Amino acid sequence: MDLRNVIRDIPDFPKPGILFKDITPVMENPAAFRAALDGMKGLLANTPFDAFGAIESRGFVFGAPLGVELEKPLVLLRKKGKLPAKTRAVTYDLEYGQATLEMHVDSVKPGDRVMIVDDLLATGGTAAASAQLVTEAGGIVAGFLFMVELDFLAGRARLEDLGPVFSLVNYS
């Protein structure tokens, strides 16, 4: 299934001049969602890793079923203040300000190889911050997995020194 036929373009969202790639129709269509999960799983066939590090919130949508299918733990990388136990945090810059990601201090053990997963790669800032959380815990970034990559925003270039980048659907 060509997921480009399912992903919807929303012009001028969230602001004029942006062509938003809406993946909600993929999740609303069980066959498309299965194709996305199977495709993403296939991208990882030759990459060893121990856990998925899922970025809030759409990374959860892909990381959770992939973790169950591949029998890998799911590490939650969440917005500040959402996790109940002791956390480690990283604050990073966005185009419009700053954001903070957290993870439980005991979610990643030294030497754990973590595959960071999210729905879409744009500039790579959140994924790079996620990699920092993993490495500060003593983990190893096994790679980055995305359903969609917006090539023209060059997020891959920001991440490639941190680990391999896997994307199922690319837009130039």
Image: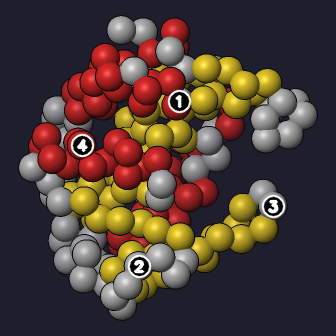
**Residue at numbered disc 4:** 65
Vertical relation: 134 (above or below) 128: below
Q: Camera-side residue: 164 or 17?
A: 17
Rendered view: 40 above or below 55: above
Circle 3 SS class:
loop
Contact, mark 2 vs mark 1 (Cβ under 8 Å): no
Q: Residue at x 54, y 41 (%)?
A: 121
**Disc 4 crowd, CA 10 A, few/some/many (<14, 14-19, 20+):** some
| Nearer-N-terminus badge (2/4) | 4
Q: Secondary structure at mark 1?
A: loop
Residue at image x 53%, y 30%? Answer: 23
- Mark 2 vs mark 3: give the one in front: 2
Q: Can residue 5 be seen by looking at this rendering? A: yes
Of the 4 image quadrants, the one containing the N terminus is: top left
| Foreground pick, 57 / 90 | 57
For the point 78% across and 57% down, the residue is: 95
Q: Which mark is residue 23?
A: 1
Which comes before the other along the chain, label 3 or label 4? Answer: 4
Amino acid marked by disc 1: Ile
Residue plotted at (24% across, 82% down): 106
Which label belongs to residue 96? 3
Which amino acid does the dot numbered 4 rest on?
Pro
Q: Is residue 96 left or right of residue 65?
A: right
Q: Are marks 4 and 1 in contact (CB under 8 Å)?
A: no
Return the residue found at the far left: 71
Whether tag 1 and tag 3 are in contact, CB under 8 A, the answer is no
